[in-house]
Amino acid sequence: MFQHTDDEMALLVDQMTAAEKADLLSGRGLWKTADIERLGIPSILMTDGAYGVRYSTTQIDAGDSDDNSLQGFLALVNQQADEAGSMFGTTRPATCFPNGNLLGCSWDVDLAYRMGAALAAECQHFGVHLLLGPGINTRRTPLAGRAYEYYSEDPVINGDLAAALICGMQDNGVGASLKHFACNNSEIERTTTSSDVDERALREIYLAGFERAIEKGKPWTVMSAYNPVNGIHATQNSWLLTTVLRQEWGYDGLVVSDWHAIRDRPASLAAGTDLDMPESKPRKSQLLAAIEAGRIGRETIDASCMRVLDLVQRCKANERPGTPADLEDHHMLSRQIAAESIVLLRNENAALPLNANASPRILVVGNGAISPAIQGSGSATTNPYRVDVPFKQICNRAGENCTVRHMPFDVETATAAVSAINTVLHAAADSDVVVVFAENEKSRNGEGNDRDTLKLLRGHDDLISALAAAGRRVVVVLSMPDTVEMPWLYEVDAVLACFFPGQGGGEAIACVLFGDQNPCGKLSASMPVRIEDIPGWHSYPGDHGRHVYSEGIFVGYRYYDLKAVTPAFPFGHGLSYTTFAYENMSLDCQKVESGTCCTATVTIRNTGLVAGKEIVQLYVRPVKSGLKRPIRELKAFAKVYLEPGEAKTVAVALQPRDFQYFDVSRSSWVLDAEAFVVEAAASSRDIRLSNTLPCRRQTFAPEKLSPQSPPSVVFSHPQAETVLRDFFEANLSLSNAQAQAILDQLRGSFLGFYDTLSWFVGDSVHETDIAAILDELNESVA
C-alpha cells in the first residue's frame, strides 16, 4: 500500500531525477498516471464519467502504448451515442444515468449524492480511481454541443448539485474531477477560440459555480479547459489557476488538463496545471528540457509532484478491488432520478395523467418510443447496462383494457413527410390520445459539434401540428440536448421535457404519463421561444478566434428579465398533478449589513388531491443598487414532499455573498443597495411571497480627485464645497455669497473642474493651487 507522511512524500520528490518528475507530471497512455517502480510509486486509473462509467477494454486493458492513444482518443470523442457497434463493443456495460441536462431539473442534492455513490461503486468494481466529472460549465446557450452534460444556466444549481455528486463519489473512495475550468461553452473551434468574458461576469456567473462546488465538495481534482480565456489558454492561465483557484479560493487539490489541451507544457506547469493528460512524448520532452535547463522553478515543480503523489495516495488508500456493483439497483436509481427530473411543461385541461379506462386507445408515434435517445454524444457516452424502452413500459402501464399501438416516424424529404403524416393521421382517427416522441437530429449536437438550429427532426413539427389540427388529444414527449423551438406549443394538450433521461428514462416517462410519478422537475435553464432570443445570440459563435460573451452578467433568465422578453418557459418552471400554496414567509434578520446571514422560512401547503414535491426557489432582488444588477437572482432552493392537504415549513439560508456583487474597480465583492426584496417563488416568473429588507451600504473612500475631475465628482467629497469656498474668498477677495455663486456656476459642467473654473475666473487661480487643495481632500479620507 502506498501510504506516506507529508515529510516522506517530500523525501520521495527529492530523490526523483528530472526525468522521473517529468514522468510523474505526465500521463501514462490514455487513462493512467505514471508509476515509478524505483521509488515504489504506483499509478492510478481514471476514465470519463459525467453520468456513467466509460471503461474501454481496448484502451485500458490492452496496455499503455502511446502509438494508438491519439487514434483511440479521437474515436471516443467523435462517437455518436447511438453507435452501438465500435464504441459499445469495446466498453464494459455500466449504468447510464440521466445526463446533466435532466439531473439539473431535479434540483435535488440528495439524488445527486446517491448518483455519485452509485458511480463510485461501479468505479470500485472496475478498478477506476478517478472519474472525470462532474461537468458544470454554464449553459449559456442551448446551442452548445456539450450543454447536455451540464446542469444549469445558474451557478447556484451548478455548484450545489456538483458538490453533492462529488461528495457521493469521494465519500465512497473515488475521486472526482470538476470540469471544465473555465468558460468551455462552445464546441466551435473549442481549442483555439478565446472565451472573452469581462471579470464581473466571470466572478458572478462562470466561476461562481466552481467556487461553490469546491467549497462544499472539495474535489480531489479540477480539470482545466481546452479553450483560451480572455486570450490565454485555460491550461496556462495563471490568473485562473493560481490567483483565483489556489490563492483566493484556497484550493489545494490537483489540476489536470483536459485531454491534449496543453499547448506549452512548461508554461502550463508554471501557470498551475499539475498533470498533463494523456501521455504525449513531445510534451513530456518539452517539460524535461525545461526542468533540466532551470526554466521552471524547483519549488513549482516539486509542489506539483507533491499534489500528484497526494492524489495517488488518496486513491490507493480508498480502493476496494473486487467490490461488487449492484447494477440492477443502480438501474432503479436511474429510473427514480429521471422520474423526479422530467419537467411537465404544459398540461391543458388535465390532459395528463393518462387514464387507461377513460382513454383505452393510445397511439404512440415516433422512433424515440422504440429506440430512445437516452444520452448525448462524445467522450462521456456510456454503454448502458440495460435500456427501458418507452413503448414497452407504456404498454405495461396501460393494462389489459387498453389498446396501445406504435407507429414509426422517420422521414428524409418533405414529400415523404406529407405521406407519413397522412398515414399517422389515418391511424390516429380512432385513437383517444396520441403520444408523440419528438427529438433532435442526433448528428447535429454533441461533443465537437454545436447545434445550428433549435428545430426538431424533419417533419416532427408538421406532424404535431397536423394531429392537433385534426382534433386529436396530443401529448408531446421531448428528448433533446437542450431547449427546442415549439411552434405548435399552444395547439397541443401536454408537453413533457425529458432531455436525455438515461437508461431508466423509458420507465420514468411511462410513470409520469400514467400518474404513478407526480412530475416535480423544474427547468434549470430558460427555454426561449426562438433561436434569436438566446442571450448573446448576436455575438455567437465569435469571429477571428474570439467569442465575446456580450451579455455579460445577464445570462439566461437574467437577460429575459432585463429585456422584458417572454420565454417559452421561464427558468424554474415545472407543473405538477397537484397544486401548492405558499402561505407564510418570514426572515430572521431585520436589515442587511456587511456579513449578514439570513434564514428565510416559507410554509408550503399541498392544496391538491395527490402527493407531490415542490421546489421552493429563493430569489434576491436589489433595490437601487450601486451598479446595474439583474432584476432578481436565484440564491437558494429547497425541495419538499407533501401529502394532500399537508403543510410544511422549509428553512432556506442566505449567505453574505448572496447580497453582494463583484466590483471590478475595487477587485472585491461589495454590499451596495438601498434594500433587498427576498422572494419565494415557484419559478423566476412566478413569485409567490416576498419580504423587503433595508440595507446599510458599505462605505467607500471617495474617488480620487484631480483638476480634471468633473465638478459633480469634486462636490461629492463631503468637505470639498466648504474648502473651495473658503479658498475663493481668501484668494479672490470675494464675499461668502460671491464665492458660493462661482461654485454654483460650476455644477452643471461635464468638463474638468479646472477647465470649467477658468471660464469664470480666468488665470487668477492656478491649476497647481486647485491640485494642492484636491490632494489635501484626498488625504483627508485616505
Image (spheres, helix red, strand yellow):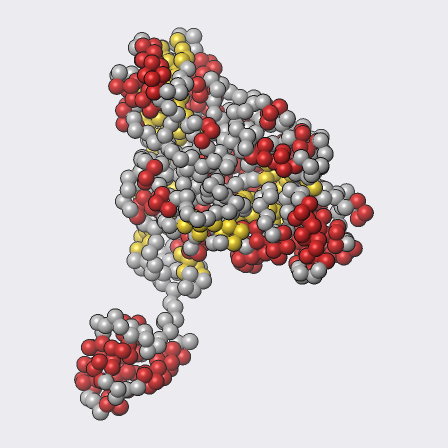
Is there any visible trace of residue 477 in the rendered image? no
* Residue 5 in picture, x, y percent from top left: 74, 53
Check the image and report above or below for 186 versus 57.
below
Q: Which residue ends up furthest to the right in the rendered image? A: 38
- State which quadrant residue 440 falls in: top left
Q: How many marks?
A: 0
* Residue 495 in picture, x, y percent from top left: 35, 26
| Residue name at image x 68 percent, y 33 percent | 60
* Residue 4 in picture, x, y percent from top left: 75, 50
- State which quadrant residue 668 falls in: bottom left
* Residue 728 in picture, x, y percent from top left: 25, 86
The N terminus: image quadrant: top right
| Residue name at image x 36 percent, y 49 percent | 551
Check the image and report above or below for 187 versus 92.
below
| Residue name at image x 67 percent, y 43 percent | 279
| Residue name at image x 38 percent, y 74 percent | 704
Q: Nearer the viewer, residue 267 or 40?
A: 267
